[in-house]
Image (cartoon, helix red, strand yellow):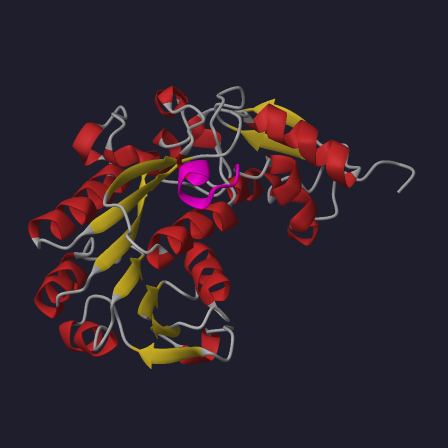
């Protein structure tokens, strides 16, 4: 089977390509810059952009199934080309925002993007699985990056969200891509428990022997100057999303706990916040 992976230089797409590697499939990846693609040798690279019809048409040549990460055109070109090429099945990395009402509604660009992406594939008649993922485990790094003094400053520090390991999202995608009869429809992809920033930092401290403290700040004071649309996906309105069984249903395995992701990604955390005996 020939499988196309888009977004393979990104976090989830990279996991998808690596998890597909060595399984006996013909794997191709559409990438903007092949020089930045650190992928297994059995993944063939095609240079191009998802918004370029000619590049997408080349990438889809002979493809049976595809993994799609949203592009600047919200997947419009890909959906059209996939429909014309008769692609058997597409797995789309979507978001909980596609079905969760945030304060700004359809004006939230995250919401608008994923609703448009799902709609484009549906209207093009392409059989698809939508992975409506919760916030990623690595979002905690947005706040830790500004904690050189050991103080993690974050808005909505007590809001609990079912953050998910990107590797689990990829595993769900790979399971759908390689199933004998992939199921169309939407799946809620979350971690095993809802955790606030305070909860996550407590876990970081325990797993890595750190001594970070948490200070709640207003959204206007949030480090990194994140746009309101992104902040909404981490705010109180997003807390209606609760742990779901999408990962288990698709892969047969439960989602990994946040602590496991922290242990695997210890090097991503800056050295501040160390305890005195370390």
As for residue 248 lying within the magenta part, the answer is yes
**Residue 236 versus residue 124 in the image, above or below:** above
Residue 149 counted in the magenta span: no
Residue 205 screen position, x and y as percent: 73, 33
160, 63: nearer the viewer:
63
The magenta span reads 247-254
* Left or right of residue 166: residue 127: left
Q: Residue 100 at what x, y percent from top left?
A: 27, 27
Q: Residue at x 57, y 39 (%)?
A: 256
> Is residue 260 in view?
yes
What percent of the width, then of the height, locates residue 159?
48, 21
Given residues 250 and 200, the one toward you in this image is 250
Q: Is residue 11 above or below residue 46?
A: above
Which SS does the magenta portion mostly show?
helix
Taking the spot 39% from the left edge, 36% from the top edge, the residue there is: 246
Say whether residue 271 is left or right of residue 7.
right
Query: For residue 207, what is the image quadrant?
Result: top right
Q: Position of residue 244 (x, y in %)?
A: 42, 28
The residue most toward the right is 277
Whether 166 is drawn above or below 13: the answer is above
């Amino acid at each position: 089977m020939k499988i196309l992976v888009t977004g393979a230089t990104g976090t989830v797409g990279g996991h998808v390509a690596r998890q597909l590697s060595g399984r006996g499939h013909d794997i191709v990846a559409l990438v903007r810059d092949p020089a930045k693609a650190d992928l297994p040798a059995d993944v063939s690279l095609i240079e191009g952009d998802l918004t370029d019809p000619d590049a997408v048409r080349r990438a889809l040549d002979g493809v049976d199934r595809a993994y799609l990460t949203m592009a600047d055109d919200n997947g419009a070109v890909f959906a059209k080309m996939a429909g014309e090429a008769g692609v058997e099945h597409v797995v789309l990395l979507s978001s909980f925002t596609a079905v969760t009402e945030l304060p700004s509604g359809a004006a939230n660009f995250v919401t608008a993007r994923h609703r448009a992406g799902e709609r484009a594939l549906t209207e093009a008649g392409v059989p698809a699985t939508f992975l409506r993922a919760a916030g990623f485990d690595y979002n905690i790094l947005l706040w830790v990056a500004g904690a050189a003094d050991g103080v993690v400053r974050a808005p909505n520090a007590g809001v609990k969200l079912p953050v998910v390991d990107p590797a689990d999202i990829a595993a769900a995608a790979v399971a759908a891509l390689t199933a004998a009869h992939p199921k169309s429809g939407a799946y809620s992809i979350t971690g095993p428990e809802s955790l606030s920033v305070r909860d996550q930092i407590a876990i970081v401290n325990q797993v890595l022997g750190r001594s970070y403290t948490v200070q709640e700040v207003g959204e206007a004071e949030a480090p990194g100057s994140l746009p309101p649309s992104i902040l909404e996906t981490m705010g109180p309105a997003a807390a209606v999303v609760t742990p779901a069984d999408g990962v288990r249903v698709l892969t047969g395995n439960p989602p990994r706990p946040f602590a496991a992701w922290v242990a695997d990604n210890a090097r991503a955390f800056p050295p501040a916040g160390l305890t005195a005996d370390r």
